[in-house]
Amino acid sequence: MKVLPPIFLSGNGTSRSLECPIIQSPLAGVSDQIFRKFVRRWSPKALLFTEMVNAKSLELGYGEEKVIELSEESGPIGVQLFDHRPESMVDAAIKAESSGAFLIDINMGCPVRKIARKGGGSALLKNPDLAQAIVKKVSKAISIPLTVKIRLGWCETTSDPISFALRLQEAGAQLITVHGRTRKQGFSGSANWEAIAKIKNSLDIPIIANGDIKNSQDAIKCLEITNADGLMIGRASMGAPWLVGQIDEEINKQKTFRTPDAKMKISLSLEHLKLLVSKKGNHGLLIARKHMNWTCRGFQGSSSLRHKLVRARTPHDAIKLLEEELLKFNKDI
């Protein structure tokens, strides 16, 4: 397999280069600054994203915590916005750019009902005129590159993803990420990589493939089928912040990545928990529970450990559990 070259994007005055073609997807309730810190540990040059941001909320001054610290982070960080009002999208994009966003991404693929029923996310797949107008207005309002994430359409019977993607390209999108399912599918069934290939063959701008990429073998197969310029890794990275770096290393450098062992996973969970508690107080434990549940898997005794962790009543109790597990490894040395 050929090595994937960097991806070059030209904004409305500011050009950017994606040196790593493997991208970490924005994940609601997951890809906060602390999660990005861990992804960055294995992927120093990859494009990462904040959690998806409601453009109207950002315009009104809410949700700023998701973008206010961007300039303090190393490596490229994009901001993904969603809404159906062009003016709100423009104002939010300008705010995100001033906060240090590497690029702006517009979400036109989120299948969540509460977002789609208000006209945002995947609802824009049903309104190509509005989708095109949003891209055109936002791309003219910012100097950094504008990208878009889409699905294959609202449903199989009415979708025309090539035509839709071409309109976004014409409006000023510099790159399009395609999730290989329709909105109706949600996350069920299999991603249609062949459909992504057809979009790639029809457009001039870079295309990023997304959907069902859980490991390096999936990544290689997806690239062979789609001929995409890069890949976006989503749900598979929950509990595995090393995955973007692993895939990048194994497909581009042809090296065998050392997947974290049990001790490293427990140590990572402990570090993650302490950082969340330090930033969020007792609420940090509630956030950490899902991360610990995802990360502490695949080793002897992991099921029992997860059972105890999700029932820990205080941060101190959870920290003690993880520290005791680490001590067992130290005794075995």
Image (cartoon, helix red, strand yellow):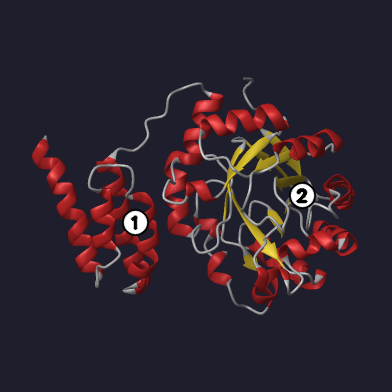
User: Can I make out residue 236 in this image?
Assistant: yes
Q: Quadrant of residue 205?
A: top right
6 vs 219, nearest the viewer: 219
Tell me the residue at 78%/58% (across/down).
154
* Residue 139 image position (x, y, % from top left): 81, 56
Q: Determine which quarter of the picture holds residue 227.
A: top right
Q: Disc 1 residue type?
A: Met
Q: State the residue position of label 1.
A: 292
The C terminus lies in quadrant = top left
**SS at badge 2:** loop
Question: Which residue type does callout 2 highlight?
Answer: Leu
Give the mark nearest the N terminus, 1 or 2: 2
Numbered marks: total: 2
Q: Which mark is residue 83?
A: none
Q: Nearer the viewer, mark 1 or mark 2?
A: 2
Nearest to the observer: residue 19 or residue 208: 208
Kindly identify which residue carries mark 2. 152
Most distant residue in the left direction: 331
Q: Residue at x 76, y 49 (%)?
A: 152
Q: Secondary structure at mark 1?
A: helix
* Near-viewer residue (132 or 219): 219
Q: Quadrant of the N terminus?
A: top right
Q: Residue 88 location, x and y as percent? A: 76, 72
- Above or below, 137 against 22 in this view is below
Q: Residue at x 70, y 41 (%)?
A: 192
Residue 284 locus on image (x, y percent): 36, 69
Separation (CA) of disc 1 from disc 2:
33 Å
